[in-house]
Amino acid sequence: MAKKTVVSFRLNGVETDVMVEPRELLIHALREQCVHTGPHIGCDTSHCGACTVDFNGKSVKSCTVLTVQAEGAEIITIEGMAQGGELHALQEGFMQEHALQCGFCTPGMITRAYRLLKENPSPTDEEVRYWMAGNLCRCTGYQNIVKAVQYAARKLRGEAVETSHPLLEEAGKPSEPVTA
Amino acid sequence: MGLEPNLERLTQLEGIGCARKRREDPRFIQGRGTYVDDVKMPGMCFGAMVRSPYASARIRKIDASRALALPGVIAVITAEELKPFKLHWMPTLAGDVQAVLADGRVSFQNQEVAFVIAENRYIAADGADLVEVEYEELPAVVDPRKALEPDAPVVREDLAGKTDGAHGARRHHNHIFTWEVGDKDKTARAFEQAEVTVTQDMLYPRVHPCPLETCGCVASFDKVKGDLTVYITSQAPHVVRTVVGLLSSVPESKIRIISPDIGGGFGNKVGVYPGYVCAIASSIVLGRPVKWIESRSENLTTTAFARDYWMTGELAATRDGVIKALRVKVVADHGAFDACADPSKWPAGMFHVCTGSYAIPNAFVSVDGVYTNKFPGGVAYRCSFRVTEAVYLIERMIDVLAQKLGMDKAEIRLRNFIRKEQFPYQTPLGLEYDSGNYETALRKVMDAVDYAGLRAEQAARRADPGAEWLMGIGVTTFTEIVGAGPSKMCDILGVGMFDSCEIRVHPDGSAIARMGTITQGQGHQTTYAQIIASEAGIPASVIQVEEGDTATAPYGLGTYGSRSTPVGGAATARCARKIREKARLIAAHLLEVSPDDLEFDLDRFVVKGAPGQAKTMKEIAWAAYNNVPSGLEMGLEAVDYYDPPNFTFPFGAYLCVLDINRYTGETKVRRFYALDDCGTRINPMIIEGQIHGGLTEGFAVAMGQQLPYDEQGNVLGGTLLDYFVPTAVETPVWETDYTVTPSPHHPIGAKGVAESPHVGSIPCFSSAVTDAFAHLGVTHMDMPHNAYRIWRQSHALGLDRR
């Protein structure tokens, strides 16, 4: 076993030290040592994005980063999204627009969308789809994820927001308007 | 009572029909879900699997000494270590046996050979690399048709001399079963007398559901108490408990199986896998918790694939397109072990729904199950019971017939539909469809998309020799069969396929409800509460729904095959009605009237003709614990085990418009319109989500997914580098619509929905892609419809030359 190293970073605003072997992946240090189990592991090949964290202002797949590379880094995970007891607009949007089912991809999705809206506060639907293409979802078909990101974008821009799924439907009206 | 107050109380109740926001979401959006890999126990160690690089080989020697010498490796187990416990083989859900760890030989690539237990997952992986296995490679067979040739390599030496399988006689060393349904002779006569016949071969390739969370478990055996607790990615925790009990001879009362949050199942998490058994066995021996988590490649190449059906369909019809008979021959590739989770009596599941939405008087189906040197499964992918294959076959055959007759593909469907007034409808293959209204559904879709306009546009495109993009229109009108199932027809390991619900109403009027099913994203914690709210008048917001823990939940068969709403939902409705009827007795006692004089009104009982005299469910709940009529037990609890009288038959009409580049094979889905009828709609928001998801998985299967093999039995495509999972970019925008035709036999008329969009969309994509080339005589194109394969079709027709 290789010698262990102490690595220090800020995790959701909190100074954090972990002791790791040089080969230990960041996702394992976050999940097993820091007990931040929000980011998940879904593949071996950096395709699925379930492990996405915000790393020095960039979206990073933490299964493809060694923990030792995180020395001095500023890391935000899903656990750091809600502030002051208030959900982040994206968290609210995902719930209001039914943008999740099994929930496994959700932490990575929200963390990725967080960076997207920082860099592009008014994306088109097509831009949202392009920016989120590194995050796979097997349940939702992405349509409501796009809506959720747009919901959050509107809220963050200070505009009024409304769910597309009112509690009671008008009788006979399709559940979703036709938008090709 | 006016409408206004009712609406307000209805809103508070959040019952059936409301787009209630999900109770599951707060934990998931904050990263507070608990999936199996999030479970951490004191003293927990990790297991890693050593797997075979060969598809077929004899194992000469396993040397674990270098692995055992590695600091941190605790143990290495092989079949030899499991033999004293009789755990080296296990029963499958299909009546076959499967090697837990290879017993002298391997029969598929990546088969489980040894299990390394170590202090952490890194050391376990190192240890697995250090286990040295000597193999003697043997010839492999990967094509199920070649597997039935007389001199084909033997896949299963352990079955030598066994002429009987779980489903009757075996006629060849790689033959598992032959399953025949329908009237062979009558069908043959209908073909002899037919004016027109068509035949078509089609392959439904091997695919994998690839849920985002792989399979895994944490097994913990308490040596002092003799209790076994297993956190596991299972869609059927009670079935796992029964299997573990059978295998380990620990009584079921000492086994607790917990399915915590599940990161998607889609049928991949129905089976019992060798990794689970190894983790459990290791924990029993070591007395320490053992965690085993699959990698993505292990998931894609060893656990529960789907399909691999090699089908030939034939239709007999009149010249004007009235179908007289259907005949189907299938060679079903089950891989090296028969591990399907079909009902015991039906080794091809509900494939006999293959007469579809059409009034076909004669039909005969024959399915041969075959062993090959590929991984076992066949239970999976948003339809565990071969309905996807059946619907694909009939929908493709209808198109083939339409083309032969020169008929429009919508028109031929309208001509052959089972009519609304024919329900309940007996099919020639022995099923009784509960309800349907197919013509209304198809006509609604045709109007919504301006079908005639689309066909006119297509005709103009075909007439233009310079057109770079070919236009295809796909139509499907499918009938699903879900809600397995009636115990007289369906059982797994001898356990009838009922499901269950238990409700306890607390003194303050809030309630806890537990079911034998388990949500994996379907939103049961939300929707079951809605059923109880409507049926028992308790606001959904104060109903706690729990599933997945066998220590607390009543026995049930789990969630797969869209059975939660048809079976679990029915149990829930009936259980809530038991609560309501007991509440009626208490209310009558409190109001000093006869129970018959009371009327149930949303959340209270009212004296008929005296609307001022009423007791709310909240008041009744309190009284249940201190003031009940004499002779009535205290408390307000109920349990219901529901054995459905029949399956439910959701249906839908789908239409796809796509454009294909004749030079590159690139496909652009222009429009996909999906109308689903799932009977009574419990939560329209969740239904829409299920449909979006099913359509997207259907898109994946039709347009890109497959797990091909080379001749040596190497699986090609076992990582997300090769295996197609659509991203937000290529996924089409979906349009959804609905009609409502309730099930007459379900307590609330609901039919189930999650599989329909998958089952219905796949043939719709194939229909559209083929339709783009139909004017050039193409009747069928096998999936996946990726750009290369479509380009090859274009190239074969000379369309790619300028």
Image (tube, rainbow, N blue to C red):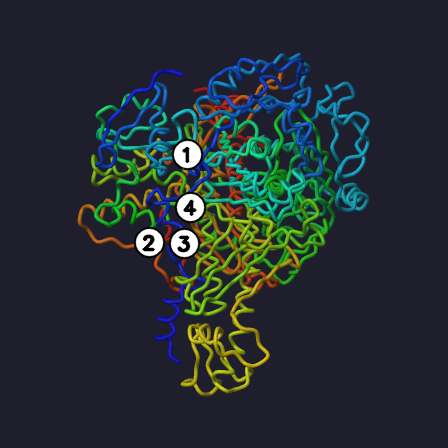
Q: Name the residue tied to disc 3.
A: B685
Q: Name the residue tied to disc 1.
A: B668
- Horizontal relation, residue B794 to residue B175: left or right: left
Sequence-wise first label, 2 or 4: 4
Q: Nearer the viewer, mark 4 or mark 3?
A: 4
Q: Type of residue at label 2?
A: Ser
Q: Nearer the viewer, residue B605 or B702?
A: B605
- Horizontal relation, residue B457 to residue B224: left or right: left
Q: Give the chain of mark 3.
A: B
Q: Type of residue at label 4?
A: Gln
Classify mark 4: residues with Cα within 10 Å, few (<14), some (14-19) or many (20+): many
Label 1 to label 4, Cα distance in Å?
Answer: 27 Å
Q: Type of residue at label 3?
A: Met
Q: Nearer the viewer, residue B170 or B159?
A: B159
Q: Name the residue tied to disc 2.
A: A164
Q: Which of B75 and B448 is in front in this view?
A: B75
Q: Name the residue tied to disc 4.
A: A101
Sequence-wise first label, 1 or 3: 1
| Helix, strand or loop for disc 2 | loop
Disc 1 + disc 3, Cβ < 8 Å = no
Q: In this view, does B29 lie above or below B92?
A: below
Q: In this view, does B418 lie above or below B582?
A: above
Label 2 to label 4, Cα distance in Å?
Answer: 17 Å
Q: Name the spot of residue B449 as percent of width and height, x first.
A: 43, 49
Q: Nearer the viewer, mark 1 or mark 4?
A: 4
